[in-house]
Image (cartoon, helix red, strand yellow):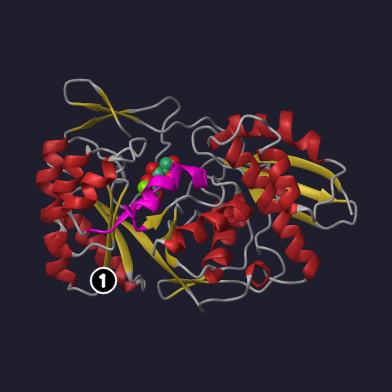
Amino acid sequence: MKISDAYTIVTSPGRNFVTLKVVTDEGVYGIGDATLNGREMAVVAYLEEHVIPALIGRDPQRIEDIWHYLYRGAYWRRGPVTMSAIAAVDLALWDIKAKLAGMPLYQLLGGKSRERVMTYAHCTGKDIDACLEEVEAHVELGYRAVRVQAGVPGIPTIYGVAKREGERYEPADSDLPAEHVWSTEKYLNHVPKLFAAVRERFGDDLHVLHDVHHRLTPIEAARLGKAVEPYHLFWLEDCVPAENQEGFRLIRQHTTTPLAVGEVFNSIHDYRELLENQWIDYIRTPLAHGGGITHMRRLADLAGLYHVRTGFHGPTDLSPVCLGAAIHFDTWVPNFGIQEHMPHTEETDAVFPHDYRFEDGHFIVGEAPGHGVDIDEELAKKYPYKRASLPVNRLEDGTLWHW
Ligand SMILES: O=C(O)C(=O)C[C@H](O)[C@H](O)CO
Ligand SMILES: [Mg+2]
């Protein structure tokens, strides 16, 4: 069996997605998600110029060999563009292998470790009261876990909070980067009040999460972690930029609030110090940015040695292909923690027909052979690519800050 064709499909049913389709000479095909939010066309160029020509004629069943060919063989290792391109190939090849076996992907990985996959929803509001209403609505939908982000008095726009009531939050919301304003002091003074209000209204059982989006220094993160301890968060996410991994030692020394890290990581090597020193509790890299299933299963196994669990990134800027494959992975992986869930638009769901379903705050994996997600290429053509950028963030005095 040989790979006879491979090509990228760029579509924008509400937001941009890049899909790689790998076709075999026996007619079986697989698809992988290659979407890197705000940098979509860089991955397309990498795939079209450097990966696809080298794939044609190879045996699609040799997933391991192809992975190392693309990783070691490239000489230029790691990095989000490279690892997203490799991930797209890897997801497509696992899709093909599972289809050839006539099995849903989770069976090939080792079978079910659980019946359903707990998800967390995004709840945002311009202030604490609006946010509590969102939490109420999501609890009614069945969610057992919610990520809570509210506007902060004195900061005009805030990451993760929809611009207008009732609208979805979209990170890549303008042609060129919009500029946001940030004040650490205002934020740190406000956030504990938000969690006090959530616990007072919803009690102790709801799992509550929060994303800091890399905006604090280690000592500030330690202060926040300590301040929210009475509200026992499920996790505090990306509390500092993680290039300085040693910073987590300081945070860990001061707080028992669990820490999640890694939605911008793309390799097992990014996590080595954090895991070996037991500084974090959840790994966040999605399959589509972390080299696919072949690489992420190694990371999950390493994490398991240190009692660290998975909590895959799952925003709307990863396509249903990534989400579908993640649900198979989550159903299998022994050290599963939680799966992020931001529902895709109806247009996106129509372009990517899938067999996973949401029920009572959980995802239920499908039984179709492969990862269970397809692409309607004719429909995809109706939604042309449109450049969209993530914002930048500045302190009140104009200094460019972390985002
Ligand atoms: O979902 C999250 O936790 C995020 O932080 C969302 C990111 O900002 C988004 O995916 C960036 O593209
Ligand atoms: Mg995040």
Q: Mark 1, residues whose alpha carbon is within 10 Å: few (<14), some, or many (≥20)?
A: some
User: What x and y, as percent, mark residue 158?
Assistant: 25, 40
Which region is colored magenta? 257-281
| Relative side of 104 to 140, left or right | right
Q: Using the rendered view, name the quadrant where residue 118 is placed.
A: bottom left
Q: Is residue 176 magenta?
A: no
| Relative side of 255 to 393, left or right | left
Which residue corresponds to mark 1? 206
Q: Using the rendered view, name the quadrant where residue 369 is placed.
A: bottom right
Residue lying furthest front in this view?
276
Q: Quadrant of the C terminus?
A: top left
User: What x and y, as percent, mark residue 338?
Assistant: 41, 64
Q: Give whichever of 110, 389 is nearer the camera.
A: 110
Q: Is residue 268 magenta?
A: yes
| Residue drawn at x 73%, y 65% as measured from the top left | 98
Q: Amino acid at mark 1?
A: Leu
Q: Is residue 168 visible?
A: no
Q: Give whichever of 311, 6 is nearer the camera.
A: 311
Above or below — where is 116 with respect to 10?
below
Q: Using the rendered view, name the quadrant where residue 399 is placed.
A: top left
Above or below — where is 302 with respect to 184?
below
| Residue drawn at x 52%, y 48% as measured from the top left | 318
Q: Quadrant of the N terminus?
A: bottom right
